[in-house]
Amino acid sequence: PEKPLPFKKTLQMRRNYLGRACKLHFEVSPLKIVRASKQYLYDDNGCEYLDCISNVAHVGHCHPHVVHAGQEQMGKLVTSAGFLDDKMVQYAKRVIETLPDQLCVCFFVNSGSEANDLAIRLAKSYTKNEDFIVLDQAYHGNIGSLLELSPSRWKKIGITQKEWVHVVDYPDLYRGRHKDDANPALKYAQQVHTAIKKANEKGRNVAAFISEPLMTSGGVVVYPPKYLKLVYSFVRSSGGVCIADEIQVGLGRCGESFWAFQMHDVVPDIITVGKPLGNGHPMALVVTTKEIADSIGEFNSTFGGNPVACAIGMAVLDVIHNEKLMSSARNVGKCLMDGMRAIAPNHPMLGDIRGTGMVIGIEIVTDQESKKPSKEGAEILAYKLKEQKIIVANDGPNKNVMMIQPPMCFTCDNARRVVQAFDLALADIEKGTSNKPLDQSEDGKMNIPLNILSGLGGPAGLGIMAEEEKDDEPDVKRARYDEMD
Ligand code: PMP
């Protein structure tokens, strides 16, 4: 068998051959994960980690039913679209059976970004309008058109808002401007109404409103009841359509319904699905109405809907159903949030705890009264949880929200372990180091204060790469980058 590269060599080669913009989890002490099973990741030393972040491994890492389906189909037929294929039509039918009647036409693509790009094209061709309304802090993909619709990325990559993009507040009930209003749903939805009016005054018309039905990119934002229903009615009465980006939250993850939009008593005109569909195999889908689907002249995707993807997609649906993963997500999510709420009175840094099913966000704040986001606290917490062999990422607009979106086979025992780990780690941080921020040096490398490291067993315990560590892999490309700098 092929000999694995030593850890340092892998790291060095990554630095050499990959773009600097591609970030790692745990930049100062990255993990090399070599194998995974169910909700567990294993590093190059055989150490097991509880995975709270891999929402892509929807039914569990390397689920045998899914792996078998892919392997079997791969040995039989791998072809691009253009031929009649049973797997493709059977899979499309199964997806459509989970949706309201009007969402009855599928387009197969390979990534969430591709799906959203096609959704935008469909909205434009159907409405003959050009403008879009998005929520502040949204992320909808890495393709040019979608970066324009992803305010969460604008600052970082230097995009300025285009005249065809209209941004409204996301309905933030924790800190937002209408949080204390008697009817925050209406107040926030009215912003959409105003955005449409302002666009119309400039002679512009809205093609679509696009949002996640449960907003992960804002650090898990649960909309108030009726918000989406009001927004959809404003958009439709102006001639626009409504796109639900279910790329992170679809396929039962929210626990309450198979699709997240169903929690809001609305039916979108277009939905996009990605990440969980293939349990790690790259595949994505757009589902829409017949009228909207027929509005584009032609569509081709070389790999979209290939028989391997469809076999895998079908196996994923089997597992969700057979293992009752949707109801499990509801119960386990509740167990986790109840546990967190139970320890919250002991932890001034535990802010809002929110979500539904296996989409949970936990705010880390300097104190519960001021609700001031603590990015530093969240970063330290992520490293401390890693010490306890639990992988959680900090994200959201202020990078202070601990995001928990694990494989759906996550159990209540796992949830209790996570709560216990938060309890321990937060107690440690709050004991005296919580007000010592991480030092972010110019090159973006974090220097964790030594007093925190010592609490974790010192730098060796964390496995942090010392700056002076050398490797025999020549730093050719990086040297070239550096010359360019
Ligand atoms: N929409 C949302 C809500 C996402 O979270 C992502 C991926 N993070 C995308 C779209 C883009 O999907 P992909 O990375 O598969 O292109």
Image (spheres, helix red, strand yellow):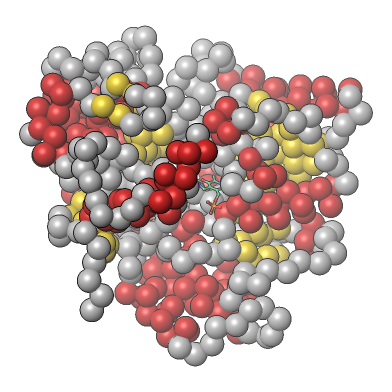
Which residue is at a point 84% across and 52% down the rendered structure image? 125
- Residue 359 lies, with reference to residue 162, above or below; the image says below
- Residue 308 lies, with reference to residue 460, above or below; the image says below
- The location of residue 283, given as percent across then percent down, is 54, 64
- The location of residue 60, given as percent across then percent down, is 33, 61
Q: Quadrant of residue 395?
A: top left
**Furthest-top residue in this view:** 370
**Furthest-front residue in this view:** 483
Judge from the rendering whether residue 257 lies leftward or rightward of residue 102; answer left or right.
Answer: left
Q: Residue 352: tell me if it is visible.
A: no
Q: Residue 34: tell me if it is visible.
A: yes
Q: Nearer the viewer, residue 269 or 206?
A: 206
Judge from the rendering whether residue 33 lies leftward or rightward of residue 131; answer left or right.
Answer: left
**Furthest-bottom residue in this view:** 76
Which residue is at a point 33% across and 68% down the rendered structure image? 62
- The location of residue 121, given as percent across then percent down, is 77, 52
How many marks are shown on the rendered structure? 0
- Residue 3 lies, with reference to residue 239, above or below; the image says below
Q: Quadrant of residue 181?
A: top right
Judge from the rendering whether residue 308 lies leftward or rightward of residue 392; answer left or right.
Answer: right
